[in-house]
Image: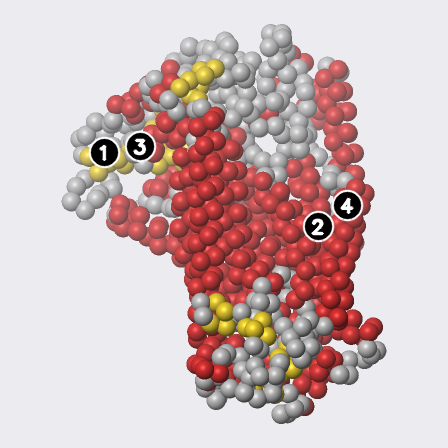
Amino acid sequence: MFKKRNQDVKRNILLAKGDRIDSPNLIGSDDDDSLVESNRSKETNVSQSRMVPVWQRSSELRRCQPRDNFFKDGVTKIDYLLVYETEEDEMPPSKMKQFLATAQERDSEVEPALLQSLKEKKWRKSFILNLQRSGVMVEKESRKKSWRYLNWLLRICMVDVPNEPDKYFTGHFKIANIKSSLDQIDSEQYFTVGQRIRIAQEILRKTKFGDERKGYVGIDRLVEEGVFTGAFPLHEGSYQTPTDRPPYLYTRRQVLYEYWARWGRWYKFQPMDHIREYFGESIALYFAWLGFYTVWLLPASILGLLVFIYGMFNVATDIPTAQLCESAQYFKMCPRCDEGFGCTFWYLSETCWMTHITYVFDHPGTAFYACFLSFWAVAFLKYWKRECARLVYDWDCLNYVEDEEGPRHEFTIHAYAVKRNPITRQLEPTFPTHIRRQRMITGYIILFFMASLVFVAMLAVVVFRILISIPLYRHPQLKGLAQMISSWSGAFINVICMLILQSVYSKLAYKLTQWEMHRTQTEFENNLTIKLFMFQFVNYYSALFHIAFFKGRFVGYPGNYKLLFGLRNEECSGNDCLSELAGELAVIMVTKQIINNTSEVFIPMLQTWLKSKKTQVYARGHLTQWEIDYTLVPDIGLFDEYLEVVLQFGFITIFVAAFPLAPLFAMINNWTEIRVDAQKLLCQTRRCVPERAQNIGIWLTILEFIACIAVITNAFLIAFTSDFLPRILYRFTFSRGLDGYLNFTLSTAPAGTASEPCMYKDFRDQEGNLTPFYWRLMVARLTFVLVFEHLVFIICAVIDRVVPDVPHDITIQVRRERYLAKQALSNSNYLLEIAEKDPGGIVVDVDSVGVSPESSDDTTEL
């Protein structure tokens, strides 16, 4: 018995499992006696319903499954868990009674001790979920990998994972033609574990406990109202691997922990089929995308490291840098702040070490690397589409079509009208479209306001940097480090502001999206994704855009300085702002990654510990699996993980011209991210419902948007921020070499504007007017931007046109399967031959069942 501090509390745990799925539109329902047992004497009440399992292993493996995951018979597996709390001797709430009574009406008998579905004895014409088709399980041909010749190089990354899931394709068949064969097949080979969980969830979501028009439908609302304190599938025992059992007898959870989630497997390929089998296609596609992205970062990281090393070793041969360091007191520079504040004149040679750092990030190699990353980003997305097509083909989701999505339970609660759904012909809650649009406009106005707070925070950091740099410039020992200290301290303050605003707006965006009353979960998630991405784009990238394109460009010149709140505008350190942009990017990326990974590791552990202390569950000694799972963190999906990696993709593509090491930092983070996310889902979070998916959804559109922005941004970075074009134009205009280039980039302050003659960095004459070279350089910069972006976009468009999204071998395989399906449908003996060769290879695929209204009694469209 679980106990709270000063009172006894019962946790009534309902483990729901359906045998064959019934719904109000089922035809030919049997009236068999229910298999019901009472367990009222126990303080922990367990309610169970039966649904036959599919993936049959050996009898020895079945005996090694956790006892807590099965019914009393030791054979029927538990799939779904409902938990509710009552005081000692308190009766369950009336809504719960109505909920369970309705479940009883749906071909299930319900008592507090047990929920057991009636066992049906004949085929149904339709299944719940209204899916497309059912299938025949036939082992797929092994696909030849494009990297088969590199296996000897990749062997160290490969891992032999036991219990490889079967692969199959689905096709149409007639029940009348194979009924005799199906009668010989074990009935427990119809549904996969994931299918059973999805079906159980669908039943619970559609079970009524009151007036449907008022939204009294589904387990989600009961959980939100506190009638149930939890509703989730059950993990397959402990994730820790036993020492007295061979690997092929591990549970799915143990296999994933041993061969995927452990830190010792950081260099191994992910067992995608096992991930998909346990967590479903939606989560498997996230890890497949993250792993694919990490692998593609490897060549980008290596090349970026080579570019960085080239800059380090080539800085000694750079003529302007050498002349600057040897200039001693030749170039006297104007004070960096007003002389009235105590700032003094300084010599350009004092920035020798900073100029060396600047050249490491700003040399001809970085321009080439920015061009390479622009192509890389587009190619990565193109080949991810191809890899995604391969995966969804292997997982039989290539032609998957989502069912008609029902309304969200929050929508049904707050909607005040009903309307007949033209698809289902059922009355459903509705909400006026014009009111929703007004609320969406209000939501985006609030988004604009929050984005303006980002700019206010950024402006405050700019003022902070100006203020802190003044006393540093006056200090004789620190004046050479003034800009670096102010820049890095400002970067850390920026990160703190970003994290605070992110936390505030994430909660606000969720509330706003709920208030907008989107009907389906997909609409809700898409609108939430767009809001959060737009805000985070401004939140994390605005400071970087400011340094890249605005800082140091509105300073003015001696005698005509631009002021901000009475203070002279800040200048860039070194010769340009590229090195400062690299520092800001490094601080934001590394700090954000450390904070996110640390929170993902320790926050779930803390939440689990607090939950166990609150319920005092571990005080009872031996715990059942459902008690352990109840203390775990509720599953909240992968939204935050997607957003984190997508923002990282923006860091390494949009600003890569300033920081070639960004892909390397991203790759190291992703290696960590995969294991952190794996352990969080497998060890610290309640099991999620395995959802099907065909792609990564709206995130792919966002990635394509970022890739386009990256092309334009890199073009402007090379043209306007880097010193690349001014050097080239100087060579073509004045000299083939760079002798005299340093002196050429400096201008003399107009007479009478300073107490002593001094110089400043700009292309101006002695009166402060812009020189002709400045205008020629401006034309060159604009021309470069146009040529660069058009060239990249044209080449990418050609690649997109030439390279199909679906690989040729997958297209052939799909056509082959369609041919086999037609043969099976037209030839009554075709599937019988397959069944005779492999009786275990014929399986009804519940995720694609559908019935044509015109179908005859002996024919089901599968």
- Residue 77 visible in the displayed image: no
Using a 10 Å C-alpha cutoff, classify the residue at mark 1 as few (fewer than 14 neighbours), some (14 to 19) or many (20 or more): some
* Secondary structure at numbered mark 2: helix
The residue to which callout 2 is attached is 378
- Kindly report the distance in space between the C-alpha atoms of the residues bearing marks 3 and 1: 14 Å
* Residue drawn at 64 percent across, 75 percent down: 768
- The Cα–Cα distance between marks 2 and 3, rounded to whole angstroms, is 47 Å
Task: Give x and y (percent) for residue 264.
Answer: 54, 60
Mark 4 or 3: in front is 4
Query: Splitting the image into 4 quarters, where does residue 266 fall?
Result: bottom right
Work out how far the residue at label 4 is from the one at label 1, CA to CA, in angstroms: 63 Å
Q: Determine the residue positioned at 44% across, 19% down.
A: 428
Mark 4 lies on a secondary structure that is helix
When the figure is inspected, residue 156 is found, relative to residue 409, above or below; the finding is: below
Residue 193: x percent and y percent? 51, 33
Instruction: Give the residue pinned by disc 1.
Output: 86
Q: Mark 2 and mark 4: span between their CA atoms?
A: 9 Å
Per the image, label 3 sits on a secondary structure element best described as loop
Of the two numbered discs 2 and 4 on the same chain, state the one appearing first in sequence: 2
Front-lying residue, 111 or 482 = 482
State the CA–CA distance, disc 4 to disc 3. Answer: 52 Å
Q: How crowded is the residue under tag 3: few (<14 C-alpha within 10 Å), some, or many (20+)?
A: few
For badge 2, the amino acid type reads Val
Coordinates of residue 609 in the picture (x, y in percent): 32, 52
- Number of residues whose C-alpha sits closer than 10 Å to that of mark 2, classed few (under 14), some (14–19) or many (20 or more): many
Residue position marked by numbered label 4 in the rendering: 797
Q: How far apart are the alpha carbons under marks 2 and 1? A: 56 Å
Instruction: Tell me which numbered mark, 4 or 1, is placed earlier along the sequence.
Output: 1
First-in-chain label (2 vs 3): 3
